[in-house]
Amino acid sequence: MCKVGIVGARLARCTRVIGRHGGSACATSFLGGTQAANATGSYASASTFLNNPTGALGQLDLFPKAGALRGAAPDTSLIMGFAAWNQDFNSSPRDWTFRGAYSGEGTNPGWLPKLEVKP
């Protein structure tokens, strides 16, 4: 079984994985740190939850499909001091009931990953 791990974290610091979605070539879970409200699954099942998880750069769309990757909002009180803690990958206000990098579902209103600096 594969796992998504936290590597290189300073042991003296508290490491947290909150509200993420992880998928890999095999069944996966997160390893390391304090974890809360994460969603995991296989690479093969990613298209069930994400718009175009196997697309080429510029077409890769990891935005959640409608009705997917939602759950109760986790406690975020310990991360409120970090810059942009309440923003998603599109710099939109974070709705912590969504799992993954984005707050929203359906059509991605933002930038699709490609080999360039994100605008």
Image: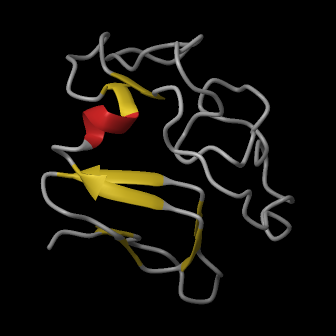
Q: Position of residue 92 (x, y in %)?
A: 74, 25
Quarter of the image where one finds residue 16: bottom right
Relative vertical location of residue 5 with respect to residue 100 in this rendering, above or below: below
Left or right of 57: which side holds 119? right
Position of residue 83 measured from the top left corner of the image (x, y, whole percent): 79, 47
Q: 93 above or below 71? A: above
The mark tally for this picture is: 0
- Residue found 79% across the figure and 55% down from its top: 82
Relative to 31, 1 lies left or right: left
Q: What's the residue at 74%, 57% (across, down)?
A: 73
Instruction: In this rendered view, identify the residue nearer to me: 3 or 48.
Output: 48
Q: Residue at x 62, y 43 (%)?
A: 98
Q: Nearer the viewer, residue 12 or 37?
A: 37
Viewer-side residue, 7 vs 55:
55
Q: Which quadrant would residue 104 be assigned to in this image?
A: top right
Residue placed furthest toward the bottom: 12
The spot of residue 95 in percent (x, y) is 75, 40
